[in-house]
Amino acid sequence: MKRTLPLVLTFIVGLIMVGEFFIPHHGYREMTKELLEWGVIIAAGAFLLGVVNLIQVNWPVIRERRPEWIYKVAMMVALVGTLIAGFIGGESRLDQGQGFKWLFDYMFVPLNATMFSLLAFFIASAAFRAFRARNTEATVMLVAAALVMLAAVPVGASIPGVGEYLVAIKNWIMSVPNNAARRAIFIGAALGAIATGLRVILGLERTHLGGD
Amino acid sequence: MIDGVTSMELLGLWISIFFTFSILSFLYEDNPVYKLGEHVFMGIGIGLGTVEAWYGVFKPKMVDRLLEESHYWSFVPVLLLILLFMKLSPKLADWARIPIAFVVAAFAGVKLTGEANGRLVAQVAASMPDLPALYEKHGWWNWEADGAGVISGLVLVLGLCACLLHFYFSAPHNKPMRAISRVGVLTLMLSFGASFGFTVMGRISLAIGRAEDLLGFSQPPGNITVLGTEMTRMSGMRWMTILTLLGFIAALAAWKRSGGGHQEPPAQATGE
Amino acid sequence: MLKALVRFQSMDRRWVFLGMAFSIVIPMLMPWSCSFQVDRPVRALYEQVDALEAGDTVFVSADFDPASRPELEPFYRANLHHLFQKDVNVVMGTLWPTAPPLVLPIFEEIAESYGKEYGEDWAFLGYTEGRELAIKSIGASVRKSFPKDSRGNNTAELPIMAGLDGASDFDMIISVSAGFPGTQAYVLQIQGQYNLNMISACTAVSAPDYIAYFDAGQLTGLSGGMPGSAQYESLVFADGPPEGARLMATPNMNVLNLGHLYIILLIIMGNIAYFITRAAGVES
């Protein structure tokens, strides 16, 4: 019963969702619209579950003063502060002058943007240290990368005599070998996703239900 | 307040520059200020997601539908949510399988049809070029159209087949298959090289955005007062950036001197 | 010399970081301009939007965050200008929780600059969660996906939504996408099922993937990364940006110039050092 009911539910819901693509019947569509909304609500609920779990994991670290507990305090303060600002603001939380908007503009934006901008520096370091033409394959990849980098920016296109050919070759690489490789990857991924989807719906794949 | 710059906005600008450098300080070394910035980022990000989940999902789709529209079917997701939260209790965790099964099945169903239609059927159909039409439009090779033509059409199809064969592991590769597989690998390498080029472009763009903000290019027109001196917002932003950067350099130097971070091991004493 | 090359290959990466920082800051402080040409997918995107008529309604899915602002915000702004210049109605929603505080103020600012009325000419429906399920729901019914707009009004009662429900009721779907969920999920889940006219602006990292969708006709236009945004800006603002607006991506193309040249130089120098030390039999 512990596993049978979820497996039966998986089969029924999975089949209904597959049918959504093929069956245009109005009543069926109304049913699937409702089911999709339930799925959206549960997916959002799973996010909330993650938040509760985060607090469950970090609260003992703070209470027992384990290493780096002070940073967990900072995280909790930021979390609670954002929640308070958001719920006080209500539907006008996104308006200029609201605490929630201030937190977003002056704390979240610089933190989020800078965190990702670190990647520019790391990719430079990776390119210098690891990108070596050790064999034919690596050489092909290196030449393609250099060509695309040069042709994708105005300076490459402006090189007298060869600029327009560089751009044409870059566009050719994107439209032909890149497309060929991407499509091969897409087709393989699609076959895998179809197989996995079928396995889940038919109950052959049960890892999402956990152990007994 | 000067020209519409409120004290909260000025405080916000200082804080935004502080947090920018707190994250950038990681490029020097992992340090307490970076860790602070990282944890604050996580806290705000999760708080933001929770607030938006309430106003975007729970309130309009569940609460308002129940209370304002008396849509009684909305009790079902309420019940499913309650079952989901039972995951937090070791005794009742098994009940959470029901909403998990529901959502996993829904995702499996939509992904199955989506991948089959969007990636399998559409992409295979697009990989069968109409060679006579290509010849009529572009000939064998047309530089004006970035190399479009019959040759490119054939390279696309053959490259695709070679890549697919390279990924076929159900039978051992004999000599002809190995040769075709090598063509597939070279095609993949061209694609990954192009990917790398675009990835570099994307990453540098992210850093450009931060530099723009720090150098004041994204500031609106107007004046601001920094440490008692009135100046344009762009200049003000630059001065605030320079002062904060100098402060960080001094703080990191002091932290290193006091024994913080990775220290070089002391030289081994030689001899007995 | 060999020792120097070995030390060069294993030099502290912080010097590389410093070089990267200079290659970004210097061209910003000493700008120079280089012209650029417009790629085929961006031109196709521009032409698709230009073909819209006054009174048409588009659905924009603005799915980006502060991290992807430099690549996508220029396109997003230019696209809104383009749409409002043509008196196209714009309904917007998002699948990313970090998007509303970012995209709504810009939407409001540009709509109001064209004298557009909320609820009649433009509407922001807010955020919904659920990834592929949310997109499938948008395909079936935008009203059900976003029962209330960001101001708490019933979506179905907004004048702009009169006669519009499923994604296929809109004249175009515009996906401004920084990742997942975004363009790819829209293409896979609903573009084919409802035969939607769909264009996309994506980050440079995703562009090599989405080119395949563009060439297959699943996307009728594609703008990739900052160069795509700059090219689109150059088409929309061919006579210069309107008052209060500025070109955002175009000046940054010059910064990309030096950034890319720096990376190419690093790769070349690293490989030269590698080959010399390898030929000499020295382990680097």
Image: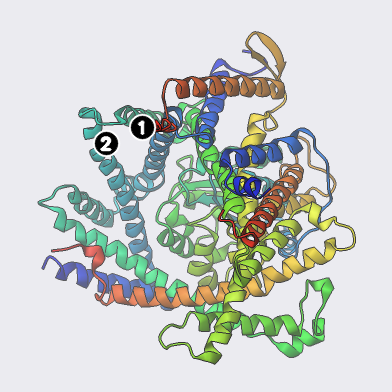
Q: Are marks 2 and 1 in contact (CB under 8 Å)?
A: yes
Identify which amino acid the numbered label 2 is placed on: Asn
* Element marked by disc 1: helix
Residue drawn at x 68%, y 82% is B155
State whether residue B61 is above or below residue A103: below
- Outermost residue on the front side: it is B272
Estimate the x, y position of residue C151 in percent, counting from the top left. 48, 39
What quarter of the picture does the N terminus of chain B occupy? top right
Query: Badge 2 local density, few (<14 within 10 Å), some, or many (20+)?
Result: some
- Outermost residue on the right side: it is A161
Q: Chain of mark 1?
A: A
Check disc 2 and report the residue beneath it. Answer: A58
Would you identify the image quadrant in which residue B129 lies?
Answer: bottom right
From the viewer's perspective, tell me whether residue B260 is left or right of residue B238.
Answer: left
From the viewer's perspective, tell me whether residue B250 is left or right of residue B205.
Answer: left
Check disc 1 and report the residue beneath it. Answer: A75
Q: Are marks 2 and 1 on the same chain?
A: yes
N-terminal-most mark, 2 or 1 = 2
Residue drawn at x 76%, y 77% is B148
Q: Does the image show residue C211?
A: no
